[in-house]
Amino acid sequence: MNPLIALAVLMGTAFTMPLFEKAGLKPARLIFLAALTLLLVISGGILVNLLNGAPDLEVATAGFKAPFSINFRIGLAEAAVWSAAALVLLIGGSYMIHREEDGMYDRMLYLVLALGVTGLILTRDLFNLFVFLEISSIAVYGLIGRGGERSLQAGFKYMIAGGISSILFLIGTVFLYRLTGTLNIDGMAAAAGSGSLAGTVGASAVFILAISMLIELKPFPANGWALDAYQEAPSGIGALLSSAQASAVFIAFTKISPLFGDRLAAVLGGIGMLTFFFANLMGMRQKDEKRMFGYSSTGQIGLVIFAWFAVRGTGMPETAAWFIVGGLLLTHLFAKAGLFWLSGLADKSKGEGGNGFLHKVLPSALAGIFVMSLLALPPFPSFFAKMELVKLLVTGGSWWILTALFLGSLFEAAYLFTWLVKKTKAECTDGGADTVNGDSLVVGKRAGPDILTDSPAAEVSSLLKSSTSLWVVIPALALGGLSAAWAYMAGVFNVIAMAPFAAALLMLLLAFLPGRVRGFLAVLVSAAAAWWIWPRTEGIDQIFAMLFLGGGSLNLFAGLYRKDRRPGFWAFSLMTVLSLGALVLARTPLEIFMAWEVMSVGAVLIALQGKRAAGPARTGMLFALGGGYLLMTVLMSIGTTTVLSPAVAAILVVIAFLSKSGALGLHVWVPGSYAEADNDATSLLSSVISKAGIWAMMIFSIRILPGIYGLDGPELWLQAFNSGPFSFLSGILGWIGVLTALVATIVAVFQEDIKYTLAWSSISQLGYIILAFSLFDHFGWTAAIYLSINHFLFKAMLFLAITGVIYRVKTRLMYKMGGLIAPMPITFITVLIAIIALAGVPPLSGFGGKWLVYSALIQGGRPVQAALAMFSSGIAFLYLYRLIHSIFLGQRKDDSLGIKEAPFWLILPQIVLIALIMLISAFPTVILKPIIAAVGELMPAVIGFEGSTLMSAIGYWNGSWVMYVTMGVFMIPLVLLLIGTGRKTRKVKQFNIVFAAERPYRPETTHYAHNFFAPYRKALGSLMNPLGRKFWEGSAGGVTAVSSAFRRLYTGNGQTYALHIVLFTMAAALFAGVFA
Amino acid sequence: MTILGQIGAAAFSVFIFINYGFLLAGSMARIRARVQGRIGQPVYQPYIDILKNNARRTAVHHGVMFFLGPVFRLAGGLGTFLFIPAILNSPLFANFSFSGDILLVMYFIFFGQLGMALGAGQSGHPYSPIGVSRGLAQMSAFEMPFILSVLALAIKHNSLSITAIVQAQQGGIANWSMITNPLAVIAAIIAFLGMSMHNPFSVVIAPQEIPIGPPTEYHSGLLGMLQTNRSIFNAAKLVLYVNLFFGGASATEGVLYALSASVLHAVPVWLGVTLGVVTMVIKTFLLYFITVFVGVSFPRFRTDQSIRFFLFVPTLIGLAGLFLARL
Amino acid sequence: MIIQIIVSVGALLVLIGLWGLLTRRNLIKMIIGFSIMDTGTHLIIVGLGYREGATAPILDSSITPGTHFVDPIPSALVLTAIVIGLAVTALMLAYAVRLYSSRGSALIEDFKENAL
């Protein structure tokens, strides 16, 4: 269909709107929407045609061909952005009608805006471009001012900026016309190619034109007016301004970019990156959400501009270039529009007496999709685009730009994620977690999760009632479709890579089902995945796949103990567990990174489901993303051997994985996230997901890191780590591991909150694994894998048992418990076995881990590390005893008198785990033989079994005999007791103790539990200095201070903004060498 | 040797060393009394205590774990002893040392302590966890020099096997760890003072302020079990120390063996084993005497003081010993 | 020569207008500055289209083959630009009026409360 029809219809409808208005509001609105629908139909039709392989659509006007007339050209990029803009315009129109007052003039202006946007995208004539620019600008000026007095101010400032920009545009245009003799952009480009734009005048004209368009794209620092506009415009208008209008201007900008010389292009690209960096830096301190989205919008457009010039410089094919630029642009277009709408809808519902609605399932899912896509997380197009962009930068060795890109992204993540959390969680108004003040930690009545408060039926009906809420689904659907397309183009549109997303989506779509139904489904899917993956893997892959998927299934099963719906928990848990499977199966760098990213973000999202997890989860998110960027840098340098030195690559990778595992210094997100996550979720996080970092370190050591430098091979890689370029890692990792183990153990000793105790314990256990891993020999890696499995077993037992305890006693503070052995004997047995295993006391399997690690360290010539590790494992007794005593032994409190054993759903996995741990304790060969064999395939074996005795060069251990002897010596006194002295005793009452002939007053005063290791604190408390936290908090404080300082740039005075524009232009001219 | 034979041998070995432990405790108590100017109890007093305690009726308990505490404790003591080869080259006293090396013994020590602490915890008496808290805190601290000295030996002899370490020390006092690595031995001896819980590290069982620390609520048969453990566990620790640092005792070597070999043409096996046991008894007695000597000479540390003490000078000595071993 | 003069005058007007826009605190004066800029721009456009000694680009009997006439396109452009400039100026004035009536002040620095 001829796109001119669209223009005609839009203009016609706009100007005849008063007529329709006479016929009544409804017909007027209907016509309004019909015009916008037509726009979508036409643009969509053209897009479909082009996708089907039709050639670019050329449209001439006035009966002449270009350059004798204005012509339109629609390629795939134009068609795609046009259709997207049309879609957004249609939804926005509906939004305006339903949610904001729509006067006749608003509808007219809106249609004019649509007209301007369409023209900007389609036209190839420079002056025509000016006209459409002005048309859309005037419409925008008018629409911004609809929001009341303050929006008038913003509109006026916008007009001043737009006015300056349009004057520059005109001047540039006419000079170019004078020099080239044509207004046709392609003609100009051809003329520029033949040299008619050389010289100062030509360069100045191009520069002026470029800068005028750039100003419309809101570059830093000449964008104060735009931020005011975003802040004050009604949400619906902000949505369009940020998405459709900005994208259209950008497309126009790309059209004139062939005129730019290399230097100008570099300056413009640089401005784009600066904008991205500074906009996001300043966004961090933003409280007003629309202004915050404004910062994000200018930042995103800055990134798109940067990307455009970055790909332009490489001369890559058109499709590859648009893969990057289009991915970023379209993601921004849909996501930002969606966010503005959601925020507006939430405001409305707040105004109507509600408390916002973003905490409900569908809106929160939508908000999550929009934010995640803006953060360039998989599977959204921006993810693939950013990967490719990073690849460009890595290949070009542009480290500073890469740093700015990553920092800007982190800043953006910080504030967008904070917003998301704040809006989607109903209860997070009470500030950060206070672990010392006991009362605030009482879990309280189990009211179900935050993001779901209505019954399923009410939820669905309220959705149906507010049809505009459903409209906001459309951008999310569009993002979904684009994701699939981009994944397909990137070559990862396969079952394995997509399964996590599909699972999460399915779980969210089924959110109306009862929680346990979906829980069962999740367990089934996860177990099926484990079943499926078993024959498809071998060696350490298989071991870890079973740990991930088998362990994940077990943990998911435990999650069934809660009856409520938990939409987030089931979706993200299943997603994360499946992504662990995908990680094991991933082969290409992209697949690996994608699975890794999903897994690490998924873990944060799981943690986020806890009531008070907002703060820690945000830190976790930043560490996950930051680690991801480092990893991406290394993965993207595959195939470009010269750009990263092996040491740098290794350090980046190690930092990425250590921040996942929570090694000392990078651990700050772990304790809070683990402690504040839902109790059963913590088990999943600690026992299963935390091992991903270990597995990934192994895989990167064997395959990927050496692969970059051509060192991958059965012997080569090991050599690279033992004496080659990576050999420095071994010692560093060893010390990191042992210090993590030591310090985290000591910190764990002093915690009153049981979940913090276990969280720190997890950190320290991961320290042991890192320590064992750092040996890079058969012994050490066997130990690392064995420890991983053991840690899974006993930490899952502990966390699940504790889940039951907290579920029953409604507190996390240990000193408030006591004497629970009586009501919860099975849970007690679980904890008992788990702490014996964790402490490494024979005969249980934990000792095997200790034996392996210490023997490996001594044999590897690291006695000091071995000594420190043993020392810290001794300290582990302190918190372990404290844990079991304070909870289960001692005096029972009055308020726990009526409680029962933990629910069946929690007990069953515990029993399975007990059985497993007893099995591998009595018969270590069952598990150690496969591990030794699997590791033996990678490197020369130095330990092995003789019979059932595990032999190393310096020692030996026969787990089965230890078990027999222990059982024997245990049975003798037990039998004596049973047949002898113990027979005729009776159990005395609680307070019947030898208490100086007195009766204790209260259990609280008799239960010795609070500050259990006071002397220890006195002696070693100074080691508790939270250096890591201070460092990160200091860094964050510095960044926010800088952010505040820069924000003062924006005074709110329209004249200052105009001055910014002038100064900005002059500075840019200086850099672009216009005056030269 | 058949399994049954092994069990029989182990039972015999346990029997010998339990009795030795009783006598040692009795004699040391008497020595201590003499130092303090008292006459003191007879040497056989521990037997009387055990018999008396076991004869008494156990009337009350505080729960299952309370019952299992002493069981754990005794099992821990027996197990620790059984994983140590008591006399070198003597199958009768080799115990079950083939189950694991020194690491196993070091960690199995915790088995009894943990179980005991749990049992005491269930009694509900606040003094029990206070004692446990002190004990654990102190234990984690004195572990440090002990670990360092054990690692020094392991490196010196390139083995974690106790048998191998003892074997390497045969052939004269010059081969003993005491001579080859005196620093490690000094660190280990200081750690041993902490392990024995005599002064200045006796605050754990705090005879004055807290009745008897963790076992406060235990009585009659249960207390008897704890006392039995004390003797076997003491013997186990002493045997371990002598094995590691003072040349151990061999059924086929040593000064006594050489003496009798010079008298007899061929030393019969039973005599060799006996001489080994006698050697072990003499060495352990002297070793234990050190703790008694220190115990009666010094006042007591608070828990935090002893933690800081162990983690400073003894740890530095242990580190020095470690470096000495690596030279 | 005349082209240079016209264009220079136009450029000067743009700068004067810009100076007014940047220094006058009154909204109306700022708008006047903007208008001056606009006018200067129009002058530049027309100036650049001018051919010395050429006639108007109107096809009538006075045109013979070989006659020079001025470039018609800038003239067409300037018409459009004037119209657009008019629209923008009108809108600005409307805003200024609305702002003044809301606040009783026409000073630009009184309208900066939505910063930060």
Image (cartoon, helix red, strand yellow):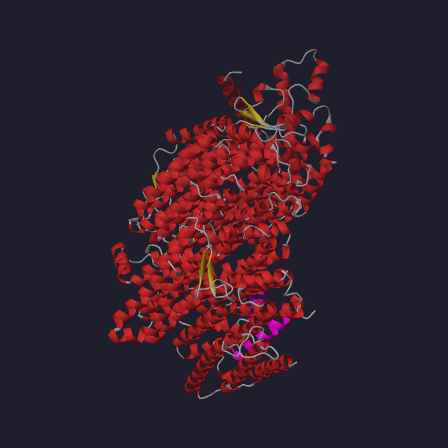
Question: How many numbered dots are placed on residues in this image?
Answer: 0
The reply to whether residue A892 is visible in this rendering is no
Does residue A362 sit above or below B138 in this rendering?
below
Does residue C95 sit above or below A706 in this rendering?
below
Q: Main secondary structure of the magenta part?
A: helix
Q: Picture quarter containing residue A189?
A: bottom right
Q: Would residue A230 be counted in the magenta stretch?
A: no
Foreground of the two, A246 or B250: A246
The reply to whether residue A464 is visible in this rendering is yes
Where residue A56 appears, as percent x and y from the top left, is 46, 54
Foreground of the two, A817 or A96: A96
Tell me the magenta residue range: A1038-1067
Residue at 63 percent across and 54 percent down: it is A399
Direction from residue A260 to residue A331 in the image, left or right = left
Residue at 40 percent across and 52 percent down: it is A49
Where residue A52 appears, as percent x and y from the top left, is 41, 48
Where residue A368 appears, as percent x and y from the top left, is 41, 56
Foreground of the two, C60 or A560: C60
